Image: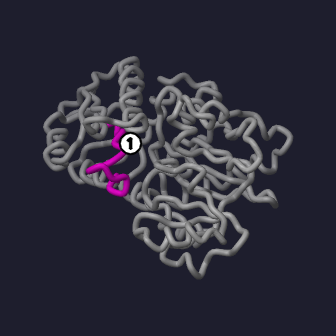
Amino acid sequence: MVPRNAQGDRNKRAVILHNRLSGHPAPDEQDVIDQVKLVEKALTELGLDCLIRDVGDDLYRDVLDLQKLSPAFVFNLVETVFGKSELLHLVPSMLSSWGIPYTGVSAEGLFLTTSKTLAKKIMKQAGIATPDWFSVDQASGSLTPGKKYILKPVAEEGSAKLDEDAVFSGDDQAMRAKLISLNPDQYFVEEFVEGREFNLSVTGKPGQYQVYPVAEMIFEDFPEGKERMLGYRAKWDEQSFEYTHTCRRFNTLLSDPVLHDNLVAAALKCGEVFQLSGYFRVDFRVSENGQPLVLEINGNPCISPDSGFIAAAMQEGLTVTEVISEITKWLNG
């Protein structure tokens, strides 16, 4: 539904908001422009007049300018604030305080899920299974020799600057020394789960979610000893082995409806616990005993044309315009 202005006329102006790019953006940063183009095309097809704006170092001025435009809503594609993912919640918080409706997860939901360690604490309290973890300054007393672990950034998207060299054994003395030197506010250690990897894309709000088909990440022809993981190279380096040998498949659980239903139930519980609205994605690994373990909850995940979210929606039978329309149904603010 498109909001009306004070005179009762339909407001057909939408602002597509993204983070300002650096001078020499890497492929993962440049990707937001592909998302902008996709959203602009879809909203135009829906009869909306689109304006594209970005936010940079003067966040107050950039967001305040949106108030003057008085849009029907802001389509929030901001992925970093001041170059940091942990500040994502600032933009929706400001939009909400000025009464500007916006798409996607609320400020509170982004704050709780962007910090992976905070999200894991909440998941554990809520009974949502997630791999065990600890801070890097606890490493010396927490690592078990022979067990595998993975070093992760606390706030960045899971694949940011992350590849198989982040996976290590508990008796790796060089990594033990490295962990002690790292900032515990920026990194943490998680037990590495070697099972199957899935992700679920969801739109809606608590009590009214639509879950799209379950996607499994397939690591084809990975040699013995090469860690099966969706790291930076698998996502962004088109010339790499990881990129060319990692693919997404649907309908891999037709013979295992119990696991399928458990994945869906866990994704829905994540949405309810964190009160997520708009659109989000939940990433899983499955343990040896078949239990889905939540790796990350991604509010406002990537929706570029080749993204997993768009692929899942199209697998459901939706067009790109239809899924963007679905996202705009659940406005905050």
Number of disc labels = 1
165 over 211 or under it: above or below: below
**Quick one: label 1, few (<14), some, or many (20+) residues within 10 Å?**
many
Residue 156 is situated, as x and y percent measured from the top left of the image, at 43, 53
Residue at x-position 52% and y-position 43%: 232
> What range of the chain is rendered magenta?
74-88
Residue at x-position 19% and y-position 47%: 57
Q: Is residue 130 visible?
A: no
Q: Nearer the viewer, residue 26 or 168?
A: 168
283 over 153 or under it: above or below: above
Q: Which residue is mark 1?
A: 331
Residue 44 is situated, as x and y percent measured from the top left of the image, at 35, 19
Q: Is residue 156 left or right of residue 18?
A: right
Q: Is residue 78 left or right of residue 178?
A: left
54 over 192 or under it: above or below: above
118 over 10 or under it: above or below: below
Tell me if residue 259 is in the magenta stretch. no
Residue 215 is situated, as x and y percent measured from the top left of the image, at 67, 38
